[in-house]
Image: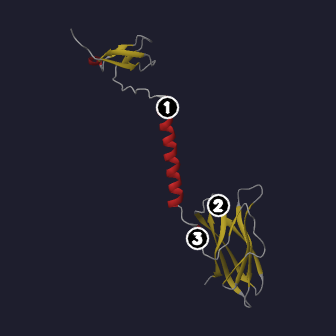
């Protein structure tokens, strides 16, 4: 009496179930279901797991994904204070400006009303606001640099604007073009005269 081991597989043409002796692996036969030639291959069949094990494995996988996402958010993200000067004021596109009295004073300049503005009917975005010369002398080549961040406060670039001459006690309404498409907020970085 000969004992043959039988293997279960599928037809490569129609997917019909086939059962054949193990020593026939690699042969080409006509499928009993569709009549097309198919190669006999040994496939590994996965035993069906009980539904409760599948659900618990899925739940465990979801918990791991959420935990790793939270870990990335907490440990990889830089704190907001590390990416902008202490004196900067953060303004998002949800909050246009806190109040006219919120101002940044530095290098005998006052910077106020920083906000993001999107051009109507266009994808262009600008950071706008006002710079005022607090000194009693003319300021030449005034350059303003604004830091841009995304919704997670991760830096995505800078926006700059330039004014040739700012008279004593005069104000300048700046309008710095935003090139980073993921910009969600802007903050003051620096202002000064260029050499």
Residue 42: name its quadrant: top left
Disc 2: which residue: 183
Rendered residue at 73%/67% (across/down): 115
Element under disc 2: loop
Rendered residue at 44%/11% (across/down): 33
- Could you tell me residue 125's position as x and y percent? 70, 61
Residue 12 as seen in the image, left or right of residue 5: right
Element under disc 3: helix
- Could you tell me residue 20's position as x and y percent? 33, 15
The tag on residue 81 is: 3
CB contact under 8 Å: marks 2 and 3: no
- Could you tell me residue 89's position as x and y percent? 67, 72
Q: Is residue 84 above or below residue 15?
A: below
- Marks 1 and 3 sit apart, C-alpha to C-alpha, by 47 Å
- For this rendering, which residue is in front, 195 or 128? 128
- Could you tell me residue 34's position as x and y percent? 45, 12
Q: Which mark's residue is nearer the viewer, 1 or 3?
A: 1
């Amino acid at each position: 009496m000969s004992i043959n081991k039988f293997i279960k597989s599928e037809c490569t043409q129609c997917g019909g179930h086939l059962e054949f002796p193990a020593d026939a692996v690699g042969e080409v036969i006509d499928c009993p279901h569709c009549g097309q030639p198919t190669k006999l291959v040994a496939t590994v069949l996965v035993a069906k797991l009980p539904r409760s094990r599948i659900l618990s494995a899925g739940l465990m996988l979801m918990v791991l994904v959420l935990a790793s996402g939270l870990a990335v958010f907490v440990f990889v993200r830089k704190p907001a204070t590390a990416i902008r000067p202490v004196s900067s004021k953060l303004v998002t596109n949800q909050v246009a400006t806190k109040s006219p009295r919120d101002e940044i004073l530095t290098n005998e300049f006052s910077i106020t009303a920083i906000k993001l503005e999107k051009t109507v009917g266009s994808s262009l975005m600008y950071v706008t606001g006002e710079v005022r010369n607090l000194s009693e002398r003319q300021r030449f080549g005034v350059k303003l640099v604004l830091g841009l961040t995304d919704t997670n406060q991760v830096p995505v670039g800078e926006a700059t604007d330039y004014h040739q001459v700012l008279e004593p006690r005069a104000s300048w309404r700046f309008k710095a073009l935003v090139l980073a498409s993921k910009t969600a907020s802007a903050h003051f970085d620096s202002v000064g005269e260029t050499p």
